[in-house]
Image (spheres, rainbow, N blue to C red):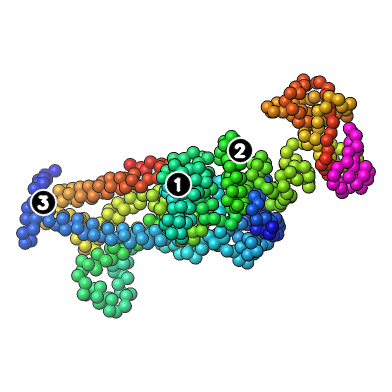
Amino acid sequence: MNYNWDWNIFFKSTGIGNEIYLDWYITGLGWTLALALAAWLVALLLGGLLGVMRTLPNKWLSGIATCYVELFRNVPLLVQLFIWYFVVPDYLPESVQIWFKQDLNPAVSAYISVVVCLGLFTAARVCEQVRTGIQALPKGQSNAAQAVGFTVAQSYRYVLLPQAFRVVIPPLTSEFLNVFKNSSVASLIGLMEILAQAKQTAEFSANIFEAFTLATLIYFTLNMSIMKVMSIVEKRVRIPGLMVEGGK
Amino acid sequence: MSALLEFSAVSHAYGARRVIDSMSFSLQDGEIGCLLGGSGCGKTTVLRCIAGFETLGEGEIRLSGRVLADAAMAVPAHQREIGMVFQDYALFPHLTVEDNIGFGLSALARSERKSRVAAMLALVGLVSYAKNYPHELSGGQQQRVALARALATRPRLLLLDEPFSNLDVDLRERLSREVRDILKHEGVSAILVTHDQHEAFAVADKVGVMQGGALLQWATPYQLYHEPVSRYVANFIGQGVLVPGKVSGPRCLTLEVGEFCGLLPLGFAGGDTVDVLLRPDDVVHDDASEQTAVVVDKVFRGADFHYTLALPSGQHVLAQVGSHHNHAIGESIGIRLELDHLIAFKRE
């Protein structure tokens, strides 16, 4: 193979203004972080709520949560993204449509679509983790809380959730990593996150291997650091005797 | 004294399986009651109905006259002012001992809460463990934390579900007396559920024997032992044998070893053939007695022997005899029956 490796490519000018290729990656990293963090916030809040709903005795509430999970888990992420980006806006009220399609910066409207899509998709997965976390606790825990005068809501708030969230930190961490990896679908609707920047770099410079190697390294470093941080968090909040050692 | 808890004609089913069958009893203020029965007899379900974790199919539960639950309504568990100690203690593992105990006291002012927790810790003898987490305590200590947590909110009734079953035998006996003292000291009424009659007798003022979802007898431990109302209760509580006898009067009957009269009417017509309950402590060893029996088997229990004796007819009876009377198997010894409580059942 006749390929000219050139690791200095990232410090060369892109030909647009006085940008170098590395600047693109930094912008891309910014978008990836902004996407993943916002989507994770949505997923954690909504998924936590749905997870609690699935454990309630009320058939309607748990039924709604179950339907949600089945729907969002069984449709491919990319299909969901296209629906949120191309289909849903057409059904919004006229004024919102104009705002979304014309007034907003295209990058921002794409950003909103991806955050909604990724947030709702991941919420279904978080829901299942939270549900198993709650169900893994001994049944006596919520009875015990009620026997000392706590309402159902209070027993969730002070007894069940504090324990359940500790138990599910390892699986939640892997969902968090998935959010970062899945955020790369944004490149398909033109949002310039890391993957899109790598593709653009490859096209502009023809240094395709370097371009994707750097993107790979960025994802890898990002996820490894999150994993390290989360395993420290897990150790900090662990209740001795309650849980087995989390996976490494 | 008024009834604190009235459990009236309650039935409960899991699906098609009836676990409590039209069961009634009542508990007086300040009393400690105990439901005794084998596993699957429905005793824990009774407790869960009182606590508010199960709904009733039929019947009614009242606390101090107020209806807690009937077939149509149920006061939520958290509004019942009924404390509960669980079999596995269900301590909150993410909270310290003092936070566990103070858990139900969030409505109190900080200083009040603190003093109540301190009082509870002192009551159960765990003052120096206030900052520890549950997993750092032994089983007996965890048990006491669970008790303190349940008592801290000053419940009107305390429910204890097999509270000592996870402890070793020595600790079980000591702790059950300790728990009784604590409950009596605090003036709290309680219902305990257990399958261990020694535990029931040690702790409770009233004991109910349950079988297949029904309450067979609700009485003091003494009455249960000496005046069981049915064969099942007689067999379930304590040891003993049933020997054949013939009714010879309203309170009297004739056995192989003579005629005996009890304190209560027997409820059988003269001439009826019946089975008569002989407890080991009814059969007294007496060297002066002309009535003899042959030692067939013996169990040394420390302070006494349990002898299995054969009467001349071959009928076996049990005798509890002081440990100083060490007789060999095959030896013939003098016996005498002391039957104040004459209990007879229809011949089967």
Q: In the displayed structure, does residue A240 sit left or right of residue A218?
A: right
Q: In the displayed structure, does residue A244 sit left or right of residue B286?
A: left
Q: Secondary structure at mark 1?
A: helix
Q: Are marks 2 and 1 in contact (CB under 8 Å)?
A: no
Q: Which mark is residue A10?
A: 3
- Residue appearing at x 70%, y 59% in the figure: B9
Residue A136 seen by the camera: no
Q: Count up the numbered dots.
A: 3
* Residue interval drawn in magenta: B248-272
Q: Residues within 10 Å of mark 3 (few under 14, many from 20)?
A: many
Q: Residues within 10 Å of mark 1 (few under 14, many from 20)?
A: many
Residue B60 horizontal/vertical position (percent) = 66, 62
> In the rendered image of this protein, does residue B20 appear above or below residue A3?
below
Q: Secondary structure at mark 3?
A: helix
To which residue does mark 2 refer?
A: B173
> In the rendered image of this protein, does residue B35 appear above or below residue B245?
below
* Labels 1 and 3 share a subunit: no
Q: Are marks 1 and 3 in contact (CB under 8 Å)?
A: no
- Residue appearing at x 38%, y 41% in the figure: A245
Residue A157 horizontal/vertical position (percent) = 42, 58
Of all chains, the one bearing label 1 is: B
To which residue does mark 1 refer?
A: B97
- Residue appearing at x 74%, y 26% in the figure: B298
Instruction: Give the CA distance from mark 3 to mark 2.
Output: 78 Å
Quadrant of the snapshot with the C terminus of chain B: top right
| Marked residue nearer the N-terminal end (2 or 1) | 1
* Labels 2 and 1 share a subunit: yes
